[in-house]
Every structure is written in C-alpha cells, then in structure tokens.
Amino acid sequence: MQVSRARRVLRVSSLLAVAIATAAGAATAGEGGTSRPDVILYVVDTLRADSLGCYGARGIRTPAFDRLAAEGARFPRAYAASSWTRTSVASLVTGLDPIAHGVHGRDDLLGPTIPVLTDGFRAAGYTTAFLVTNPNVGSAFGFGRAFDELLEPYARRAPGVVDSSELAVRSAEATRLALAWLARTPRPRFLAVLVIDPHEPYQPQDPPRALFAGCDRAAADGSLAGIARAARGGDADFEAIRALYRATVEDTDASFGALVESLRAAGTLDDTVVAVTADHGQELWDHGNHGHGRTLFEESIRVPLVIRYPPRVSPGQVLGRLARGVDVLPTLLDLARIGVPAVDGHSLAAALEGTPGRGQSVGSADDVAYASLDFEGRSLLAVIGYPWKLIRDRVDGGEVFGDLAVDPAGRMRWVPRTSTPDVRVAHERLVALAERYLAREPAPRTRVPAGAVEPAIRDRLRALGYAQ
Ligand SMILES: [Zn+2]
C-alpha cells in the first residue's frame, strides 16, 4: 500500500516536472549569469527526530528523508525553539529566540514590527511563499507579511466541520500544490512548506492494522477522542497510537519524496537548497502524556534538521554541534549567498562546508540552545549546553537538570547539586545562561483582535485540538 501511494503521488509529480524545468530554464536565461539557488524549507509539524530512520528509528520506513540525509548533512542535536507551533515557527521566520519575538500564547500574533528574515530573500530578488496547512501560523496570526504569497489550502474547506478528515490537507496534496506553485513562479524562489500529517488527530492513509494486535482497536482510531481513550488504557493502546503516528510520518515521507524526486527529474534539485526540520516533536507517553505544548523534554523539542545542497554541502555529513530553529533561516540565506542580519541564530554554513567557523567548539556561546514555552498557564525555559540540559519551571520554581550523554532520551532526573564538582560547574553555567536569557528585554506581545479569527479557521484549530 505504501508503495502504490508513493507511485500515485509520483505520477502527478512527473506531469509537473516538465513545467518546472521549463520555468527554471526561462528564469535562468534572464538573470545575466547571476542565478541564485531555489530554496525549499520543508517543515513537518510535530515530527520527532527519533521517528526518522536516519535518526535511528526502527520499524518505520522513511526512505526519502533518509536519502536526503545521505545526500546532504544531518544535525543529530537540533532543537526547536518551543514545543508548540506558533512560537517555534515565529523563531524559524525571525531567527529570534521567543523572548525577542513575543509570540507565545494562543492569542499572540507575529507583531507587525518584528523583523522577518524572509525579507532577505525578497531583497535578493526571490519570490517567497509559505504553503501552510496549520492555521496557527497562517494569515490569521500575522505570518502573511513574511511572504509574498501565503498558500492556505485549509481555508477553502467548508466551515462547521470539526475533527474529521474533511478539514485535513494531507502532505500529498501539499506536494501537488507546491509543485504547481513552482511551475508557475520564476526563479529564484523561496518556498516554505508546513505539512501536518503527524499532528493529531492521526489519519494515516493506510492505518497499520497489523500492529494493533493485542489492543483495543476501537481506541486506536487516531481521533482526538480515540487518543483520549487510549490515554486511559495501557501499554498496548499507547503502542497502537504510536503506530498510527509512525504511519503518518511514513505518509509524509512519501509526499516529501514525491516533491524531491520531481525536482530531481526536472534537473533542478542540485540547484536547490533543500532543508527539512520540524516545529516541535510529540509526547507519546514518554513522560506520561500525549501531545505537545506541555513540556520541554527531548521528545517535545528535539527535531530533525537535514540540509542538502551539493554545491556547498558534501554528502553524508553528520554534524555534532548544536543546531537550533533560529539558525535555519540564517543558514539558508548564507547558502544562497545573501547577507544575514544580526539575530539570535547564526549560519551553520561554515559547519556544513567543513571549514572552521564561529561557534563550532563545544562550550562557545553558539553551542547553547534555548527553548521556551509560555502557553496555557505554563512557563518553562530549557537551556541545553550539550551534554547538559536544564529545564526551569517559572511558575513553581522547579527545576530538572540532566546529562544527555548518559540519558539521551532526556528522562531528566534531579541531579544532586553536591554530586561532583563537574556537575556543579555545569549546573551553575546553565543557571547563569537561563538568568541571562530571562534578563533580556522581552519583545512586546501583539494580541489577535477580538473576533478577528474567522469561524472556518476556528473550526480548523478545534480539529487540531486547540480549544477556541
Ligand atoms: Zn506544530
């Protein structure tokens, strides 16, 4: 079933490949030899790093993402800026830590005065677009101003439908729309795509029924109600939901593969910077809960980051330095030879090219990642200075501190401060970094005006589990 689905998508893609090649040729001829690469940023909503084969996952097939990693570079220690969509995507678009862009809660939008890095592409002559299937980062919340075009296929859906596949735009459809946009848009182009298949409710195209043996199938339907039922069940129910999640990741891989193979067939792939990352991960009862936007444990914030661009990135690299959501746009701008303004993120291009560059040594300022969550009554800050990780709860003052080298899954037990001098020094360093972060001037928050979110968008948000 998986294979036939992939072939189906590829057939549609191959029809568009000729059109893309034609558009690419016409644009290159008109640029007087100053051609720039296309840039595609593929963001998978709710994709845990450890759910991809190239990140060590077993029992899941992700050949397209794995091939991208084999042909490009992979960062095994990449962190999102938050564990929920709007905060994290705001950091991707701005290169700013959450405290500096002010997008935290359900009612916050990307404020009109916050600089966006996509302007760098526009100034360099790119046409920019965001194909977005999660309305949390659509036009209703201020993200339209960061792009020339915002493609929001969910907005065409009928209002009044909640929690059903009728509201879901799957990644296969996103691939079709992305290829159509590329076919009609002259180079150079920056296209960000955000697909949402691994976000609950889980609606894989071919539910993995064989994996449901020994559990209550009725509870394993992947709907929000089904997940809630599974949460009251036991390990077999958890495993059924995890199987559904993995199936949605496989769907996404097939759709992403169709997009990439279409570019390869058109002969434009090697002249395209392709990056894959996620806005956050997903709790699958690792710490007793399901979902995201609740904690900053590893399963919630450790994401994939894979970048392919043969002219400057030699294949098969695995880069051990920390990479952050705020680094993604600076890196993509740099790979396109566009200047990067001063933001919290830094370009990873030097690391990708294998040349010594700023921030590659462990212990430098660049080797620290922050993630924060000020959402639904929670206020958490995580600081990672590998291998150490600190999470501070700003509501109750609680704190966990752990060593990811000995606890890669980040189960994060309390570490007695008196254990060893090394641990004390590491702990003090991260506490100081946390306090420095929190001492920064917070960006003003811009609230969504009352009544500004259309009923159709509110329905879509409800379908994703966000009470509105
Ligand atoms: Zn998300």
Image (cartoon, rainbow, N blue to C red):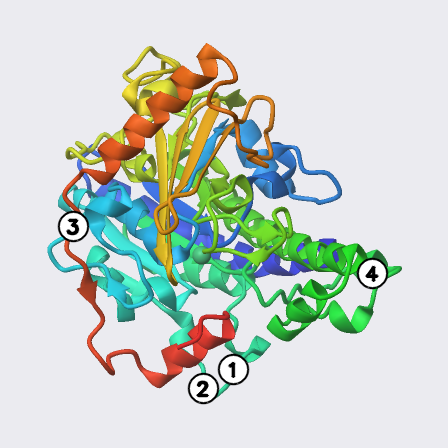
Amino acid type indicated by mark 4: Phe
Residue under numbered circle 1: 162
Give the residue furthest to the left.
113
- The residue carrying mark 2 is 158
Q: CA gap, disc 4 to disc 1?
A: 26 Å
Q: Does the residue labelled 1 lie within 8 Å of ligand 1?
A: no
Residue 68, position as x, y percentages in the image: 54, 35
Q: Residue at x 88, y 59 (%)?
A: 213
Relative to 254, residue 339 above or below: above
Residue at disc 2, CB closer than 8 Å to ligand 1: no
Q: Name the residue under label 3.
A: 443
Precedes in sequence: disc 2 or disc 4:
2
Q: In which quarter of the image is the N terminus?
A: bottom right
Of the image marks 3 and 1, the number of the one nearer the N terminus: 1
Disc 2 to disc 3, how far (Cα)?
36 Å
Q: Earlier in the sequence, mark 4 or mark 1?
A: 1
Which amino acid type is marked by label 1? Val
Of the residues tagged 4 and 3, which is closer to the observer? 3
Q: Nearer the viewer, mark 2 or mark 4?
A: 4
Q: How crowded is mark 3: few (under 14 residues within 10 Å), some or many (20 or more)?
A: some
Between discs 2 and 3, the one toward the N terminus: 2
Question: Is residue 48 visible from the viewing direction of this image?
Answer: yes
Q: Which residue is drawn at 43% across and 56% down?
A: 194
Q: Which mark is residue 212?
A: 4
Q: For the residue marked with disc 3, what is the amino acid?
A: Ala
